Amino acid sequence: MDKTELSKFYRGLLPVLWEELFFYIPDNKKVNEFLKGHEGFDYQKYRGRILVLDRYEGPVVYEEGRNNGRALLKGASLKDNIHQLLKKKADSDAMGFDYALTLYLEQVECLFYICNWLEQNLDQVHDPLNDTVKGLFRMQYDHFKAHLETLLQYFYPEKDGLPKGNFDLKKVIAVNFPDLSKKYTKTEPRIGKLQTPDKKEASPLPRKKAKKPPLITEIEAETALFKRIFKID
């Protein structure tokens, strides 16, 4: 299968990833610095608002009562992308498919970082946040977490040939997918395993929910959004 057809196939998978993405642009000093050289972009009307990447209109302000059907079906659409990838792998030469797969994985990894950050920083939104909106942000994070895990399981089962993208994929695996992390390295203890002193009997200690280290900084999340959605470099 030639490069042109694989490139077309790869681009055909991307709308499923980016359509119906819920996001926001915080109003802070770092972002203001980043946008200094982009006066032509009227971003102020978007600051601190809930936005959604509409299939036909592009970024629009989210309004209560919006039909969230496509967002609810996101998980099924992402699974269909997996099926298409598996089928294409069987019909393509290994080198060409690996290149297309690497590009796709980079997109998924980027969205996983962004959606994780967005869900963890909803306090920066100016718009009122009801349970529906909070649920949408949590749901899209869960969708991309499951999608990334499935990609790793089907296409990198032994973690061989993991691409080195813009983010630390090994760190992502270690923090978010401990079972996959165990396969990735047998010399390090499994992430999240409770360590106790070397005694015959150890009193059980109350467990505290460990706060995961941020996978992506605020400016990195903003930069990724501007580049991928608003086409600002």
Image (cartoon, rainbow, N blue to C red):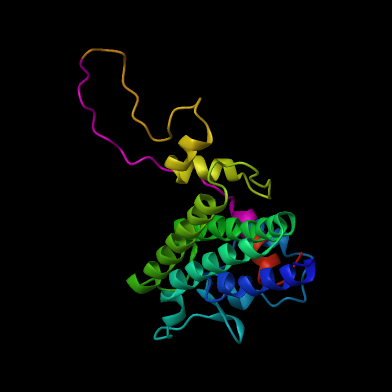
Tell me which segment is drawn in magenta: 201-223
The residue at 49%/36% (across/down) is 183
Report the front residue among 19 and 220: 19
User: Vertical placement of 224 versus 56: above or below?
Assistant: above
The residue at the far front in this view is: 91
Magenta region, main secondary structure: loop
- Left/right placement of residue 124 relative to residue 95 reads left
Q: Is residue 211 magenta?
A: yes
Q: Is residue 196 magenta?
A: no
The residue at 48%/67% (across/down) is 79
Give residue 167's position: percent from left, percent from top: 64, 48
Residue 68 appears anywhere in the view: no
Q: Quadrant of residue 15?
A: bottom right
Residue 30 appears anywhere in the view: yes
Report the front residue among 188 and 84: 84
- Left/right placement of residue 66 relative to residue 94 reads left
The residue at 57%/61% (across/down) is 111
- Left/right placement of residue 203 relative to residue 71 reads left
User: Vertical placement of 215 versus 186: above or below?
Assistant: below
